[in-house]
Image: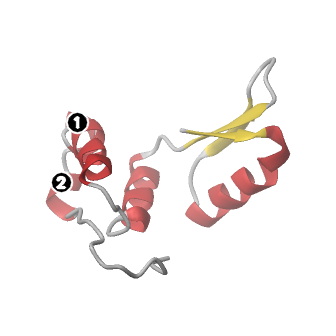
Amino acid sequence: MTIFNSLDIQLAYYIRERIGHGTVRKVKDKNAVLMIIATKKGIETVINLINNKFRTISKLDQINKNILTSPKYGEFSKTISLSLNTSNDLENH
């Protein structure tokens, strides 16, 4: 789940289109929109996109603790090996 300012709604739709998964909806009574990726395939796609881009162990641990240890996504730990980016090159996109 990612929250965007309502002025950035086009960015939320662009990201959803590029990933190929997710929904975008307006948050009631707020100046915000929510992008939610709930399908297993969508979450796997996002994890693969951000893998090897982590700079701190705490972010890596969050993915491991909150997603990869979940019984719902248990098969990911068999196919995805998360790693830190320890290089000094910040052009890692």
Residue in view at x 23 percent, y 46 percent:
61
- Colour style of the rendered protein structure: secondary structure
Tell whether 86 sits left or right of 9.
left
Q: Residue furthest left?
A: 78
What's the mark number on residue 77?
Answer: 2
Q: Residue furthest right?
A: 7
Quadrant for residue 32, please give it.
top right
Residue in view at x 43 percent, y 66 percent:
49
- 45 is higher (above) or lower (below) than 91: above
Tell whether 77 sits left or right of 32.
left
- Mark earlier in primary sequence (1, 2): 1
Measuring from the top left, give residue 58's x and y in whole percent: 27, 46
Tell whether 88 sits left or right of 81.
right
Quadrant for residue 74, please give it.
top left
Measuring from the top left, give residue 80's x and y in whole percent: 23, 62
Q: Identify which residue, 49 or 53, lies in the foreground.
A: 53
Q: Secondary structure at mark 2?
A: helix
Amino acid at the residue labelled 2 = Ser
What's the mark number on residue 70?
Answer: 1
- 16 is higher (above) or lower (below) than 71: below
